[in-house]
Image (cartoon, rainbow, N blue to C red):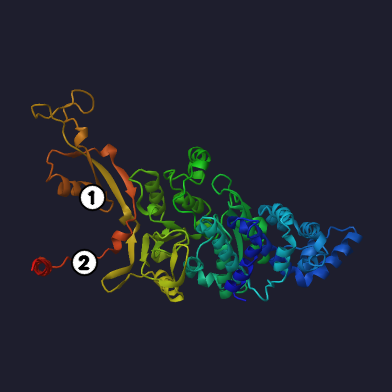
Amino acid sequence: MNHHSLSAFIWSVADLLRGDYKQSEYGKVILPFTVLRRLDCVLETTKAAVLAEQADKLKADINPEPFLLRKAGQSFYNISPLDMKKLMGDQDHIRENLFAYIQGFSAAVRDIFERFDFYTQIERLTKAGLLYQVTERFAHVDLHPDKVSNSQMGLVFEELIRKFAEISNETAGEHFTPREVIRLMVNLLFIEDDDVLAKPGVVRTIYDPTAGTGGMLSVAGEYLHEHNPAARLTMFGQELNPESYAICKADMLIKGQDVANIAFGNTFSDDGHLRRKFDYMLSNPPFGVEWKKVEKEIRREHETQGYSGRFGPGLPRVSDGSLLFLLHLISKMRPAVDGGSRFGIVLNGSPLFTGAAGSGESEIRRYVLENDLLEAIIGLPTDMFYNTGIATYVWILSNRKPERRKGFVQLIDASGYWQKMRKSLGAKRKELSDAHIAEITRLFGQFIETSEGKKPISRIFKNTDFGYRTITVERPLRDENGQIVLAAKGKQKGKPQPDASLRDTENVPLNEDVEDYFQREVLPHVPNAWIDHDKTKVGYEIPFNRHFYVFEPPRPLAEIDAELKQCTDRILAMIKGLSA
């Protein structure tokens, strides 16, 4: 059963709910039941052994939990004699039996159903007379891992969430990232460490502060398992949406991960992994979302902790918190002396250039570039994400750059690397093929400049190429007779006073001498001008598109004139024909 037909089957449950539930509420029933059936199938083969072990240990007055986990072969178990097929045998007591069955799960699983607010839905289905029919529908679908792999199950969850998000006008993109984008990010994250990750028994940590349903963590785990089955990736995450958190936790349980590593809550105001550092990190934070709700906590941390906290370099404008996630991830990097870290984050265009010199955004970019943390930025095609058609960029940062990358940043324009999808999903109309992912990974891995015809695809810059000084150019104040007004006292006594209305600024590239620039670009036009060096600020921006712009000279004027003449002659002939 592929994930499309499986989710179509599960979707058929919606037919039962129609009338008693609004369309936007279907997910409240279908998602927890899907998780319940999956867990039910996972435990099916060890059920009898777990029940026997439970009876045994209780008789001996021994805490059964560690023994039950071993018998179940999972990081969870269920001690109820019931399962979903047995629930079908007693239609009259389905509500009580279903409650008892869920209560038989270990604590981590019970928490999942509480996050789904599943007990409320059981009561509601009972009142509507639908509980037995819905449970029966799920009891008949086989979600055993032998039939449906973990990665397929992940895709099922994603498709269901996307459908529910669409019908309730929610943002599907808040819950998950397209799989092929994650595969690309995971490739970029691991490619420079292939030798290390190939060693037997290697253990590494990975963290996602905006975990959603756990897709990024899962794909990273699958990648490592494919390349080295003996390697282990320990997963950590945090998620704010209760349903996404519940699915992520269920997914991690089935994969044998420690679900205590998945924290619930707001990453900014309630960091679930305080003082922890990680080997790898991945994140697709919401684009352009304001951080007003947690402004007080963030400003307090910025002002009281400075660089000892997460937000030392600066704060972006309240209307867009993207760069706060970048700073949060930087704070989670393992120190370079302990092996360092690498992370990938998806951002929209504004973090590249928003904010003048001295602004929070510019100061954050300055910190990243002056500390040589940025390895590469990859520009993705538009229409790649479920909830937005805008251009997006993958930033790769590391505090353990290979020698050849030190002091440099690679920009890759992959906006032309896409294929049209057979069927659009929300705003997503394009996808990366395996060949596209392989080519982008190759360009990054080989750290080369390349072009397709005249158009550059990969370019390499020095960190300082993105820096500039904003100089303030002053011109003298004049009185009504046109005479220059001189200062009468203080440090400026006898010097021309500046005219605030004529004040201007110029951005001088960091690699260029300010005085040379001033002599060449300013003085020929305004001979009386001078620089107020006290007002000079250093700024950083990454004008990505400008570096890939190819100038196409306009057609010759004579050619355009000839075309216009042809056009006017044709119109005149038509008018003549009408008047005749």
Q: How many marks?
A: 2
**Residue type at mark 1?**
Asp
Give the residue displayed 55% in from the left and 54% down from the top.
209
| Element marked by disc 1 | loop
Callout 1 environment at 10 Å: few (<14), some (14 to 19), or many (20+)? few
Identify which residue, 308 or 207, lies in the foreground.
207
* In the depicted structure, whether residue 475 falls above or below residue 563: above
Disc 1/disc 2 C-alpha distance (Å): 31 Å
Identify which residue, 426 or 108, lies in the foreground.
426
Q: Which residue is mark 2?
A: 552
Q: In the rendered image, which quarter is residue 558 located in? A: bottom left
Q: Which residue is mark 1?
A: 513
Q: Which residue is farthest front?
A: 580
Can residue 492 be seen here?
yes
Q: Position of residue 559 (x, y in %)?
A: 11, 69
Identify which residue, 20 or 281, lies in the foreground.
20
Image quadrant holding the C terminus, namely bottom left
Please report whichever mark, 1 or 2, sits nearer to the chain's N-terminal start.
1
Give the residue displayed 55% in from the left and 67% down from the top.
220
Left/right of residue 125 with respect to residue 12 in the rendered view:
right
